[in-house]
Image: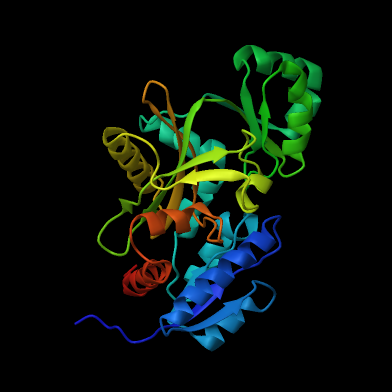
C-alpha cells in the first residue's frame, strides 16, 4: 500500500553563484506548491553548518533547487548523498558530467546524437598562444554564426551570439567573465526547444516540449526571467513526428548522462528535422517564467503533484 502521509521536506535554494536570486525564486515556488499539499516544508539556504543542520532536522527528503556552480557542479549533490537523507535529483557524478558542457557534448556525440561542432578553450591557452592568432584559427575552423558561452554555467549568463568576426573578441571576454573555459560552437538555426524529463519511479519520460521564441532574437538572461521578452509555446508548434523524435532524444540523453528524477534537455530542430543537443540541466529553473513549470502545465499535471511525485520517488529510491 502506498504511503500518502505528509512528508518533512527541506527545499534548498540560494547559494552563492551568479544565479542565487533565480534559485531563491525557484525554491519559494517549490516550497509553496508542496506546502499547499500538506507537506511540512522548510526552506534552507546552503551555507556553513548546512550538513549538520540537515542531519539534525532529519527530514524525509531534500529537494535541492540550487542553480549555478554551488548546486549543479555535483559537489553539493555528492555531499547530500553522505547524509543518508534521500534527495530529489541526480547524484553528484552524473551532475558533474552534465554541468561541464564540453564533456556532456562529447558523451552525447559518441553515443550518436547530433550536437553542434565546438572548441573548448581555456583562458590561459587563449592568452599564451596569442589571442589574435587563436581567434583567426577559430574562425577558420568554425565559421560564423557562432555561440560563445562559459563551459559551465546557466541562465544564459556570459552567452553571446556571434554573427561577424568582429564580434568574437568581445564574446570571448564575456564568457571568461563567468568561467575560465569558453565553449565556442557553431550556431544551428532552427526551432529552439526545452524538454523536461521526469522519472517518478516508473522510468524517465518526456513532458511536452516548450518552444522558445525570444522577442529580440536572443534568449538572454533578461529574456528568460523578465515577463514579455520571450514568447513560449507549450506544447511546441512541431509535428507529432518531430515531437516524438524530440522526446526520444531527450529521454535518451537523460539516461545516457545518468541523470535522475528530473532534468531539462535543451535542443534545436533544424529545417531538415534533425535534432541537435545543446546542453543538459540537472537542477533547472522552477520560477514563474521558467520552462519546466510550463512543460508540466502543458502535460495537464499540476506543479505540486509533480514535485510531490519526485519527492516520493526519492524517498523510495534504494541505492
In the figure, is residue 180 to the left or right of 198? right
Judging depth in this view, the residue of 305 and 144 nearest the camera is 305
In the figure, is residue 194 to the left or right of 186? left
Q: Residue furthest top?
A: 140
Q: Is residue 124 something one can see in this rendering?
A: no
Q: Residue at x 75, y 23 (%)?
A: 167
In the figure, is residue 179 to the left or right of 241? right
Q: Where is residue 132 in the image (x, y as percent from the top left)?
A: 80, 17
216 over 229 or under it: above or below: above
Q: Is residue 119 something one can see in this rendering?
A: yes
Q: Residue at x 30, y 41 (%)?
A: 248
Q: Residue furthest front?
A: 228
Give the number of marks: 0
156 over 108 or under it: above or below: below
Q: Residue at x 64, y 71 (%)?
A: 46
153 over 12 or under it: above or below: above
Q: Where is residue 272 in the image (x, y as percent from the top left)?
A: 38, 20
Quadrant of the snapshot with the C terminus: bottom left
Judging depth in this view, the residue of 120 and 284 nearest the camera is 284
Q: Where is residue 173 in the image (x, y as percent from the top left)?
A: 78, 33
Judging depth in this view, the residue of 188 and 99 nearest the camera is 188
Q: Position of residue 267 (x, y in %)?
A: 45, 37
Q: Which residue lies furthest to the left in this view?
A: 1
Quadrant of the snapshot with the N terminus: bottom left
The quarter holding residue 276 reads: top left
Amino acid at each position: 500500500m502506498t504511503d500518502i502521509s505528509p512528508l518533512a521536506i527541506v527545499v534548498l535554494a540560494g547559494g552563492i553563484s551568479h544565479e542565487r536570486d533565480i534559485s531563491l525564486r525557484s525554491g519559494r515556488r517549490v516550497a509553496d506548491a508542496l506546502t499547499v499539499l500538506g507537506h511540512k516544508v522548510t526552506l534552507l539556504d546552503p551555507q556553513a553548518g548546512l550538513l549538520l543542520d540537515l542531519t539534525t532536522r532529519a527530514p524525509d527528503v531534500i529537494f535541492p533547487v540550487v542553480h549555478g556552480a554551488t548546486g549543479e557542479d555535483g559537489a553539493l549533490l555528492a555531499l547530500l548523498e553522505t547524509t543518508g537523507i534521500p534527495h530529489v535529483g541526480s547524484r553528484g557524478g552524473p551532475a558533474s558530467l552534465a554541468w561541464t558542457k564540453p564533456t556532456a557534448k562529447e558523451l552525447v556525440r559518441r553515443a550518436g546524437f547530433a550536437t553542434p561542432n565546438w572548441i573548448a578553450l581555456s583562458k590561459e591557452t587563449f592568452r599564451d598562444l596569442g589571442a589574435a592568432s587563436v581567434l583567426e584559427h577559430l574562425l577558420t575552423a568554425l565559421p560564423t554564426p557562432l555561440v560563445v558561452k562559459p563551459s559551465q554555467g546557466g541562465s544564459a549568463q556570459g552567452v553571446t551570439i556571434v554573427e561577424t568576426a568582429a564580434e568574437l573578441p568581445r564574446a570571448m571576454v564575456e564568457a571568461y567573465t563567468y568561467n575560465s573555459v569558453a565553449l565556442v560552437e557553431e550556431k544551428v538555426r532552427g526551432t529552439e526547444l526545452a524538454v523536461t524529463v521526469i522519472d517518478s519511479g516508473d522510468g524517465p519520460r518526456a513532458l511536452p516540449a516548450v518552444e522558445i521564441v525570444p522577442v529580440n532574437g536572443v534568449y538572454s538572461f533578461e529574456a528568460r526571467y523578465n515577463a514579455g521578452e520571450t514568447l513560449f509555446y507549450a506544447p511546441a508548434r512541431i509535428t507529432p513526428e518531430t515531437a516524438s523524435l524530440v522526446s526520444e532524444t531527450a529521454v535518451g540523453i537523460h539516461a545516457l548522462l545518468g541523470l535522475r528524477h528530473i532534468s531539462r534537455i535543451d535542443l534545436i530542430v533544424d529545417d531538415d528535422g534533425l535534432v541537435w543537443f545543446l546542453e543538459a540541466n540537472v537542477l533547472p529553473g522552477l520560477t514563474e517564467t521558467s520552462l519546466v513549470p510550463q512543460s508540466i502545465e502543458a502535460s495537464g499535471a499540476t506543479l505540486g503533484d509533480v514535485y510531490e511525485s519526485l519527492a516520493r520517488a526519492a524517498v523510495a529510491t534504494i541505492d
